[in-house]
Amino acid sequence: MVLSTPKYSKSQVNKAGEILIKDNPSMNEWMWAYDVLDNWRSCHGYPINTFQATLRNKLKAVDKDALVAQRLKRMPSIISKLKRFRSMKLARMQDIGGLRSVVSDMEKVRELEKNYRKSRFNHDLVSIKDYISNPKESGYRSIHLVYKYSNSKAPEYNGLHIELQIRSKLQHYWATAVETMGTFLEYALKSSEGPQEWLNFFSLTGCAFAYLENTPPVPGYKGKSREDIYSETLNEAERLCIYDRLQAFSIVAKRIRIEKKQGSYHLIILDLDQKIVSVQTYSRRYLETANREYAKYEKRISMGENLQVVLVSAGSVDNLRRAYPNYFLDTGEFINQLRKLDEISKS
């Protein structure tokens, strides 16, 4: 398997980041910066594979049915983050290489987190963010552990950051619904951008789900009882026609093209105009080919095509749909949780 190795210095990577957020870069500048970012992102593939093997091994004792997925951050998301955080340097961005574990409940979230905190790695744990004990105002909840990669056998990757997210299923359902609704509203709701009524709804729902898991409420709702939060969530869901909208998305996206060949990596392409999801599958031998195709689609997006694309590793296609349901416009489990709230409120 051919893997990307860094071709540019960190100062060149940072310079590329500055060019990509300029208002009017020249075409030559932009093309150079894009190629630098493409290489920098691809280099995170090796460290992610190392961390995925460790994660799967840990999960054998914590939750053998847990979902594991990895991804390289999308180019538009990287550029958008650089624009939001102007002081951030591209070479120091911590979530270009991401790994996610979705476990069944909060008990297993904490067990896996504890396991990692106690582990003796060569890799440095540089950041711990507990968005469950301290939820974001958006309603987002998860554990983020950021490591700086260190491996004497592959020193060319040393210093790259890998982010591990640990979520419960309920937290995953919420995040999926946010991304799916953001896709159709054409706003980055997950980055707290978009119509205020939708941001408020998902913040409120995040608080309701926090109460379901007996964890601290979302900021702004601390003075309200769980009964009030459940009631407000259901009222807003009805006002915004949440059930009808989300169910319609799932119906619309039933035209899914999936290659039947086996492979470890999946390139998911969501055509928002045609409402078609395509999945191209690659074996480990062809990871570099997958990265090149990923970059080609993202260049098409940068030229104005209404697509979303991501390269991920999640095992089987069935696991792929569970790990990234937002790309399949599938919010069925989120809807089920809202119905559960309704049942609880009536009991």
Image: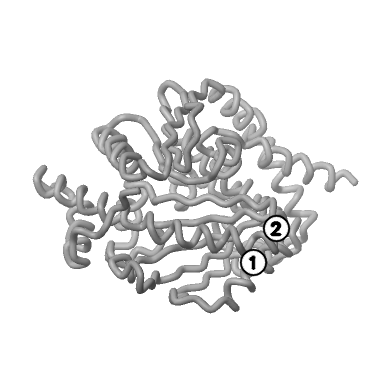
Amino acid type, label 1: Leu
Q: Residues within 10 Å of mark 1 (few under 14, many from 20)?
A: many
Identity of the residue furthest to the right in this view = 347
Q: Residue 310: horizontal and vertical position, in percent?
A: 41, 41
Total count of labels: 2
Q: Identify which residue, 143 or 23, lies in the foreground.
A: 143
Q: Residue at x 62, y 37 (%)?
A: 331
Q: Identify which residue, 99 or 330, lies in the foreground.
A: 99
Q: Is residue 34 left or right of residue 61?
A: left
Q: Residue 11: horizontal and vertical position, in percent?
A: 18, 67
Q: Residue 215: horizontal and vertical position, in percent?
A: 71, 65
Residue 220 can be seen in this image = no
What numbered label is drawn on residue 14? none
What's the distance in space between the residues labelled 2 and 1, CA to CA? Answer: 9 Å
Residue 346 placement: quadrant: top right
Amino acid type, label 2: Asp
Q: Is residue 158 left or right of residue 109?
A: left
Q: Identify which residue, 62 or 254, lies in the foreground.
A: 62
At mark 1, the secondary structure is helix
Residue 224 can be seen in this image = yes
Answer with mark 2 or mark 1, whichever residue precedes in sequence.
2
Q: Residue at x 44, y 70 (%)?
A: 147
At mark 2, the secondary structure is loop
Q: Residue at x 51, y 47 (%)?
A: 196
Q: Residue 138: horizontal and vertical position, in percent?
A: 54, 56
What numbered label is drawn on residue 112? 1
Q: Residue at x 32, y 43 (%)?
A: 291
Q: Residues within 10 Å of mark 2 (few under 14, many from 20)?
A: some
Q: Is residue 2 left or right of residue 182?
A: left
Q: Is residue 152 left or right of residue 110?
A: left
> What residue does disc 2 label?
63
Residues at marks 2 and 1 touching, judged by CB atoms closer than 8 Å: yes
